[in-house]
Amino acid sequence: MTTSISKTDLSTLDLSDLTHFEDGVPHELFAQMREQDGPHWNALSGDEPGFWSFTKAADIQAISRDSLTFSSATGGVFMTTQGAAPVEVLREVILGMDPPRHTQQRNVVQAVFTPKLIRQKAAGIHATVNRLIDEVIEKGECDFVKDIAVELPLLVIADMLGVPVDDRKKLFEWTNRLSLAAATSNPELGFGALMEIGAYLTAITAERKANPGDDLVSRLVHAEVDGEKLTEQEVTFFFAILMFAGNDTTRNTASGGMRALIENPDEYRKLIDGHATVVNAVDEMLRWVTPVQYFSRTVMQDTVVGGHALKQGERVVMWYPAGSRDPELNADPMRFDVSREKAPHLAFGGGGAHFCLGNQLAKLELKILFEELTRRMPDMQIAGPITHLTSSFSNELTSMPVSFTPGKRES
Ligand code: HEM
């Protein structure tokens, strides 16, 4: 696959064909597309309309920052009508809404999901990370994906929702089904998972409305901004999308980031020796992995992006990993370098109204995780075959066996 990539004929290229993602993110192909003048037209088979693929950071930012011209609600956010869930369902979650409904919902959610609340989670996240490390450290080996990367965001979200930690297994199963639905363009699978999450959360939402606690669900049910509140159903849908948006993404950055450190031992050494900060390394891992590969929009009125005319009704797809490795954004972008200062990237989107709501929480989780990993497992090595999901949507490792010098539990 990789050897033939430099010869790919872009005129017939169809990125809905998963063979392009069999070896992971097709960075060489993206580089070829980025070098082209203007976006790439991607025709689709059958009745599906095609779309324009954007790979340059500046173009992705321009599209992301104009949610009046580029609608999420009209045609959904996936590249075909067969995305992770039916379009009419996606319109009910914040990710798939347009202004003014999006603005109203985002204001209420932001009033609850504050930087202060996130800072308060640091001690709990720290304890969770060390518990996860404790569970494997004496063995000297584990599956980094299954034992660490999967568990951390699930436990953090279970804690925020105020649900029993044992329920995280259900959350995990639903998240995986949503991820698979996005990977295989199977809206029925995604819809089924969303309905099950909905039923689970509806009971919790109703209970917290009657008996509020200090958890995020209770706060969101009661939050009010300019006289606007979320209905119970909106709260339910918000948490359903939170599981999709906050689990896989953080997990995949953690495992892809760890892999990059192991495969670039000089970079890992910089962190262990304190010659680079974990904060900068986390931005570099986000840039390097960029776990969400794309979202799409529908053009609402004729416009121009990067000198290219777009017509009302056309679809655009923004390839975030291509934007994150745009040489216009970072020098030498194909090099993993933890000493870049606040490396700019498009892992959380290109800015604008839908910019990742959980970016601060994700960065906090990753910072604490990598601080503790470099402290307690500084000699981690790959110990078996790494496997990944073949997906145009998620840059996702499914297994990464690792080994390290056995250490002692701390609790
Ligand atoms: C490394 C981890 C993460 C990555 C890479 C990531 C990535 C993204 C991306 C690409 C978007 C779409 C941006 C756009 O359309 O412009 C998004 C939206 C969103 N993310 Fe994240 N995310 C991460 C973690 C989280 C976490 C931890 C949460 C919450 C617990 C979260 C909640 C959301 C929500 C609610 C939205 C929709 C916002 C809106 O439509 O207004 N994300 N994220």
Image (spheres, helix red, strand yellow):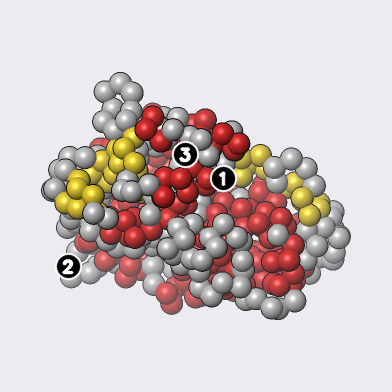
Residue at 31% over, 48% down: 38
How many C-alpha atoms fall within 10 Å of the one at disc 1: few (<14), some, or many (≥20)? many
Image position, residue 162 (x, y; %) = 49, 59
- Earlier sequence position, callout 1 versus callout 2: 2
Between disc 1 and disc 2, the foreground one is 1
Label 1, secondary structure: give it: loop
Give the spatial CA distance, label 1 vs label 2. Answer: 41 Å
Q: Dot 3 corresponds to which residue?
A: 392
Label 2, secondary structure: give it: loop
Q: Looking at the image, which is closer to me, 26 or 90?
A: 26
Circles 3, 1 touching at the beta carbon (< 8 Å): no
In the rendered image, the vertical position of residue 250 relative to residue 28, given as above or below: below
Residue type, label 2: Gly
Residue at 44% over, 33% down: 9
Quick check: 344 left or right of 147? left
Q: Dot 2 corresponds to which residue?
A: 227
- Say which quarter of the image contains residue 385: top right
Residue type, label 1: Glu
Q: Quadrant of the C terminus?
A: bottom right
Q: Dot 1 corresponds to which residue?
A: 396
Q: In which quarter of the image is the N terminus?
A: top right
Residue type, label 3: Ser
Give the spatial CA distance, label 2 vs label 3. Answer: 41 Å
Label 3, secondary structure: give it: loop
